[in-house]
Image: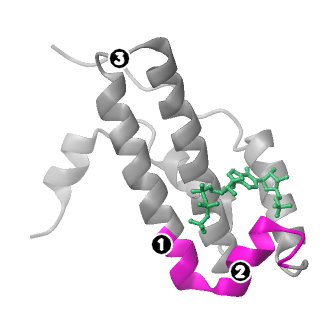
Amino acid sequence: MNTPPTPNPTPESAPVLDTLAEVLKERRHASPDNSYVASLHHKGLNKILEKVGEEATETLLAAKDAEHGSAAQRQAVIAETADLWFHSLVMLSHLELDHQDVLNELARRFGISGHDEKAARTP
Ligand SMILES: N=c1c2ncn([C@@H]3O[C@H](COP(=O)(O)OP(=O)(O)OP(=O)(O)O)[C@@H](O)[C@H]3O)c2ncn1[C@@H]1O[C@H](COP(=O)(O)O)[C@@H](O)[C@H]1O
C-alpha cells in the first residue's frame, strides 16, 4: 500500500527555536557564574558533547519506560527530549552552526522516502 504524500513544508520558521537560539548566542560570552549556557561554553566542546550524550541516554531510558507507562512517564519523555534539544542547540551554537540550517535540511527531505533515499546511496 502506498503511503500518503508528505505535505509541502511550511515557511522555515520555528519561533521557539529562533528565540532560544538568540538567547544562546547572547549568553555565549556571559559570566559562567550567572549563566548555565555560558558555563557550558566555558567548559568547552567536550563538556557540551558529554551533556548531549547524557541527555540522549536519559531520553531513550524515559522512552522505554513510557511505552507501557503512566502519564507521568510519558511526560518525562517530553522533558528529557527538551533537555536533549536544548543541549543540541548549545552544541550548534558552540560550533557557530545555525539551527535554521537543520530545519532547512529537514524541510529539504520532505517527500523523500527514507527507503528511497537509502536505496539511491552509492555503495
Ligand atoms: N532551556 C534551557 C534549559 N533546559 C535545561 N537546562 C539546564 O540543563 C541542565 C541539565 O540538567 P542536569 O541535571 O542534566 O545537569 P547537571 O547535573 O546540573 O549538570 P552537570 O553536573 O551534569 O554538568 C540543568 O541545569 C537545566 O536547568 C536549561 N538551561 C537553560 N535553558 C534556556 O537557556 C536560557 C539561558 O539560560 P542561562 O544561560 O542559565 O541563563 C534560559 O532562559 C532557558 O531559556
Circle 1 SS class = helix
Whether tag 1 and tag 3 are in contact, CB under 8 A, the answer is no
Q: Residue furthest left?
A: 123
Quadrant for the N terminus in the image: top left
Q: Alpha-carbon distance for marks 1 and 3?
A: 28 Å
**Upstream in sequence: badge 1 or badge 3:** 1
Residue named by callout 3: 69
Find disc 1 in the rendering and name its residue: 50
* Location of mark 2 (residue): 41
Distance CA(mark 3)–CA(mark 2): 36 Å
Range covered by the magenta-colored residues:
32-50
Magenta span main SS: helix
Give residue 35's quadrant in the image. bottom right
Whether the residue carrying mark 1 lies under 8 Å from ligand 1 is answered with yes
Residue appearing at x 68%, y 75% in the figure: 40
Indicate the position of residue 73 as horizontal and vertical percent values.
45, 23
SS at badge 3: loop
